[in-house]
Amino acid sequence: MKRRFATATLAIIMAITLVPLAALADWSAPEANLAALEEQYAQAIPDYKRIRYGAESDDVQRVKQQLRDLGFFDNRINTSYFRTLEIAARVFCQQARIGGDGREITPLMQAMLADPSAQRAVSPGINIYTYSSTRDETKFLTFTFAQLQRPNTRIDASVGIRGRVVGVSNEGSIQYMSMMMEDRADRIVYIVYQPLPRTTRFQAGDAVAVFGVTQGMQSLPYDGMREEQLLIQADRVGYQ
């Protein structure tokens, strides 16, 4: 009897716990919440004007700061609406399931961002200084290729690097990349990265910044990645 009661109780707790997570993970219906949220924020929506890609305004700066506070944006806070804000806005819209490709900031989105109870990013912004070669909390300095090759850096070291993607392979939701550092074809590292659903997948030629943890020297069964190179498990990858 006690065992049945404990099992039933556990099932109820799991059901209560998993409902919000299941709703959050429902990426298949990107506009599932749109009508309900438009009704919820109906009084606030008229206070805002639509902001489109390419805009220069104080409103853009405000939106960037709000997105940064919630962990969706990790770049310079200025008045320009270009690629980095487009990506952050797209991630926000997808997580909130309100539709949108990031090319405009709607009045609804602005009303949601102004809400003190606004939901934080599933993958929150990271403190990039943790990944600096100097651990200087006033200035971020990336690791050089030579620093990555040191024995004490190759395994379980938090590193931040910059380079250019030269090869990409996708396996389900995981992206494997070979990256050239310091514009030298002989300075290659491998990156394994799992972006948020429906967010940016990087392509050959993209200049990127990578923050992650070293996994040692490895070869991967993908084109252009079969030689042994340092592998980094990325926490975050962004355009330079």
Image (cartoon, helix red, strand yellow):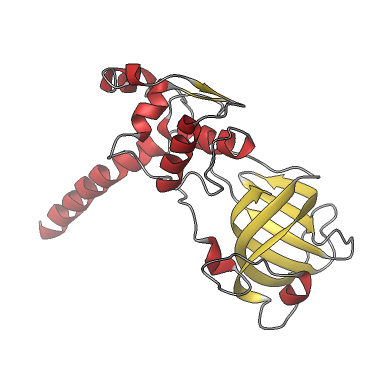
Left or right, 235 with reference to 144: left
Q: Residue furthest right?
A: 185
Q: Is residue 32 visible?
A: no
Q: Is residue 227 visible?
A: yes
Q: Position of residue 177 (x, y in %)?
A: 74, 53
* Foreground of the two, 228 or 131: 131
State whether residue 240 is above or below residue 226. Answer: above
Q: Residue furthest left?
A: 1
Q: How many marks?
A: 0
Q: Determine the image quadrant of residue 79.
A: top right
Q: Residue at x 43, y 38 (%)?
A: 25
Left or right, 57 with reference to 154: left
State whether residue 237 is above or below residue 161. Answer: above
* Foreground of the two, 64 or 232: 64
Q: Residue at x 79, y 61 (%)?
A: 181
Q: Determine the image quadrant of residue 24.
A: top left
Q: Residue at x 27, y 22 (%)?
A: 40
Q: Residue at x 67, y 66 (%)?
A: 142
State whether residue 27 is above or below residue 223. Answer: above
Q: Position of residue 239 (x, y in %)?
A: 67, 46
Q: Position of residue 172 (x, y in %)?
A: 63, 43
Q: Residue furthest bottom?
A: 151
Left or right, 150 with reference to 76: right
Q: Is the N terminus in the top left, top right, bottom left or bottom right quadrant?
A: bottom left
Q: Position of residue 160 (x, y in %)?
A: 64, 64
